[in-house]
Amino acid sequence: MLSYWEHDAWTRYDVIIIGAGIIGLSTAISLKERSPKLSVAVLERGLIPSGASTRNAGFACFGSLTEILHDIAANGENATAAVVRARYSGLQLLRKRLGDEACGYEQHGGAELLFDNNLSALDHLERVNAVLAEIFPQQAFYLHNARIADNGFETKHVKALVQSDFEGQIHSGKMMRSLTALAQERGVMLLFGAEVQHIEERSQDVRLHIRHNDETSILQARQVALCTNAFTSQLAPELGVVPARGQVLVTTPIGGLPFRGVFHFDEGFYYFRNVASPEGQRILFGGGRNLAFEAEETTALTLNDTIQNELERILREVIAPKADFSIEHRWSGIMGFHKSKLPIVKRIGERVVAGFGCNGMGVALGSTIGTETAECIIDQ
């Protein structure tokens, strides 16, 4: 039960955004940049963002060679180039807004490991570079096989390495804290522990039925943005967003770790990087969702032993066969996928806009989707 003061000062806004992940906060910041006088609130059901924004691998990337080839086959060259452009421009906007130090950004480049079963991707290297030629100042990808042995990878398994100089890595926790601080600096109200149970659109406003502290309250706004990505189906099942759990592990510090940067293989289903910590360099390794697609279409923040065991096996046999380490951290995060693999911003009501469809690229696309969502609201 709200007090008179709470009801009078905390329940009515021009815009309410559901979801305090990177899309939701980016939408709020974009709104305040365009229209500073708007009263904007962001609702988050958890203590911190509940999806993948603080639980991802910290890749500031735009897609590997084999992943982009898969997207070209599915969506065509023009659509794929448009998505890569959106990813790359989104990363630049994120860095511009926060500054590299505030989000822990490091530019060590990226690379994809190729094995016997996907070496044919090299036959399409020039084609992909041509598709992406107008996005990057130089060619997006080039062969750099010398790194295989130099980085300590098992040469019996890794047959080729495709380098990209335009990828980087971030500290996801620092990035989200900085994005939260920026939103608050712009005058955005952030309300945590507020779970939206129902969206009621009316002729003059939208009423949001909120569950918090075992009580139900109602907040009102002239317009609402649904920015929950992986959890979108809970409030708008008609949009067809499917949750996809990503699992990650991090090693103990490894002395003399020979590589820096972000790495991918198998169409982006596996990914690893170095993580600098006060105790030394570690390896972060994640993925394996393709081992159990149906089981991983879940919002449960638990672990799959089959996937965790396979990640550890690959780590020890292929990525760091000579290193001495144990696994110190394991966790999972929930991504949101749409069948088109394209980011989507659309009106789902007269006063409700949805921005979603990061498809595992939230760090890159979150700022772009947030900007488009804000524009859709303001242009109404």
Image (cartoon, rainbow, N blue to C red):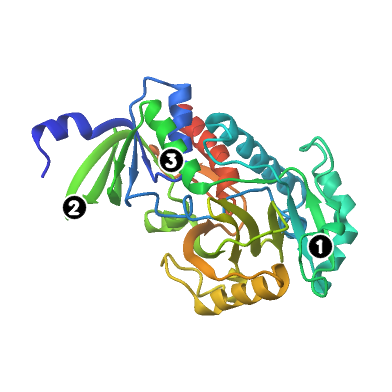
- Of the 4 image quadrants, the one containing the N terminus is top left
- Classify mark 3: residues with Cα within 10 Å, few (<14), some (14-19) or many (20+): some
Along the horizontal axis of the image, is 293 left or right of 213? right
**Label 1, label 2: how far apart the Cα atoms are:** 53 Å
Q: Nearer the viewer, mark 3 or mark 2?
A: 3
Closer to the chain start, of discs 3 and 2, is 3
In the displayed structure image, the side of residue 47 where residue 358 appears, left or right = right
Q: Kindly identify the amino acid type of the residue bearing the numbered disc 3.
A: Arg
Q: Give the SS element for disc 2.
A: loop
What amino acid is labelled 2 in the image?
Asn
Residue 19 place in picture, x, y as percent: 39, 46
Closer to the chain start, of discs 1 and 3, is 1
SS of the residue at dot 1?
helix
User: What residue is disc 2 on?
Assistant: 213
On the image, the x and y values in percent for residue 81 come to 74, 45
User: Looking at the picture, does residue 33 appear above or below residue 209?
Assistant: above
Q: Earlier in the sequence, mark 1 or mark 2?
A: 1
The label on residue 148 is 1
**Label 3 belongs to which residue?**
177
Residue at point 72% right, 56% down? Answer: 259
